[in-house]
Amino acid sequence: MRLRIGVPMWLSRRDAPKRRYPLLRGAATADVAIVGGGITGAGIAQAFAEAGVKVALLESKLVGRGSTAASTALVMHETDEGFTDLRRRYGPRRAERVWELSRASVRHLVATVRRLGIDCDLTECDAVHFTTRDERVAELFREYTRRRDAGFTATWLDAAALRAATGIDGAGAIRTRHNAQLDPYRACIGLVRAAAQRGAQIFERSTVQRIDSSNREVLLHTRAGTVTADRVIVATGYATPAFAPLAGRFRMNHTYVLATRRLKAHERRALGLGDFLLWDTERPYHYARWTADGRLLLGGNDRALVPPSRRRRAFASSRRQLHDDYVSLLPVLRDIEIEYAWEGLFAHTRDGLPYIGAHRRYPRHLFALGYGGNGMTFGFLAARLLVDAFLNRGNHDDLELFKFGRFR
C-alpha cells in the first residue's frame, strides 16, 4: 500500500535535506537490524547506536518519505484513547503509568533533538483538547478532573476562556503543557544522520524480502544483499504482508491534511488562534497547529481503509469536507488559500496504544507498531524501551503495558 498521496509541505521546502544512503549490496552484519526508515526507525537507530550497539537500518524507499512525511507532528503526551477510557480498561495504576511514560517520552524527544542540534523547527507549546458540543462538556470535565487527581497538570477552559485563547466558539476544553511540534521529515533525517555518525549502517531502496530466524541469529534478505544480526526490530508502522498473521490487530485509516498559505499578521489576529496544538472530541477528531513559517495546518476527517481504486476520489471529497469543517469552526479561513493537501495511511490499535516488544510467533524479532495519531511520542518511547530490553536494563513492567497479549 502507498503510505501517502499528495505532496506534504515538508517535502516541498527548498531547504529540505536531500541526504541519500546506499543500496544494500552483499553481506552485512549487525547486532540489531531495523526494518523501516521512518521517524520511529530513525529514533530507534539513534538510540541503539548511541548505546554502542552495532546497527543496520533498512528502508524500502527513501528515509522519512513515507508516513513520516505525511505527519503533522503534534508531539503530545495525551493518548488517542483518553485517560478516563484507559483507566476504565486497565485500572488506575496502569493508565497512570502509560501517561507517565508518554509524558516522559515527549521530554526525551525534545531533549534529544536539542542535544543533537537537529534543525527541525522544534517548538514547545500547549495543547488544547476542546469540544463544541454542550452535551459533551460534562464528560470532558470528568476527564480533566481524573487527570488532575492523578497528578497530571491541566487547566480547565470554560467557553469564554476557550474563545479568548483560541478564537474557537466551543463549550469547554482541557489545556495541557509540555507538548511540542516540529518538522517531521527534518527530524527523521537528523536522527538518521546522528545514528550514522555513531556508526549505524543506513541502507535505502533496500526492501526486506524475507527474514529467516534461528536460535542464534536472524538473516534479512534484500534483492541485492543480506544482513545477519542478533535481533531484528520491525518499525514499519503496521503489519506488512510479511507479518500477515498480525494484521488483524490493526485498523488502517487514512488521515487528511491541509496547509494554508503563509498568513499575514492581521490575518492571524483575525483568527485569534494562539500557538497551540488543537484537537477536538469528535470521532474522527480534527487537529490543527501553526508551522514555523506562519501556515496553519489542518488535519483530520479520518476514514477507514478504502480500496486503491477509490482512494483518490476519497482524498478529493475528504479534503473538501475537512476545509468546510474548519471554515465552520473558524469562519475567517473561508478566504484563506490552501496551498498544500495530502493524505497519509496509518494504523490504530483497539486501545490506541502501540505494540512494543516481542511476539511468540516470531523468534528474535522485536516490534514497534501501531502508534495511531501519536507516532512521534510512542516512537521515541519504543526506542527507549527496546534499548533497555536489549541491554537488560530493566523496564520489563513497562514493556508489559504494550505487549501483544495485553487484551487477553
Image (cartoon, rainbow, N blue to C red):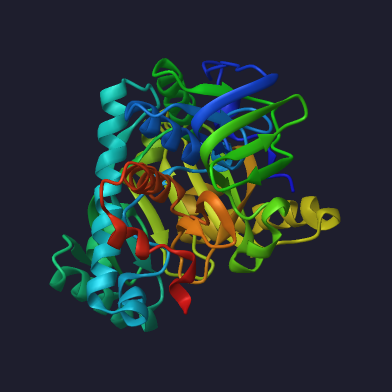
The residue sitting at 44% across, 42% down in the picture is: 73
Quarter of the image for residue 132 reads bottom left
Is residue 116 shown left or right of residue 201? left
The residue sitting at 61% across, 51% down in the picture is: 256
Quarter of the image for residue 225 reads top right
**170 or 219, nearer to the observer:** 219
Residue furthest to the front in view is 215
Is residue 226 shown left or right of residue 158? right
x then y, percent, for residue 348: 54, 62
**227 or 298, nearer to the observer:** 227
- In the displayed structure, would residue 44 be above or below residue 137? above
- Please say whether residue 216 is visible from this viewpoint: yes
x then y, percent, for residue 329: 47, 60
The residue sitting at 65% across, 47% down in the picture is: 343
- In the displayed structure, would residue 204 be above or below residue 144? above
Is residue 314 shown left or right of residue 126? right
**45 or 32, nearer to the observer:** 32
x then y, percent, for residue 116: 31, 22
The residue sitting at 59% across, 67% down in the picture is: 249
- In the displayed structure, would residue 366 be above or below residue 32? below
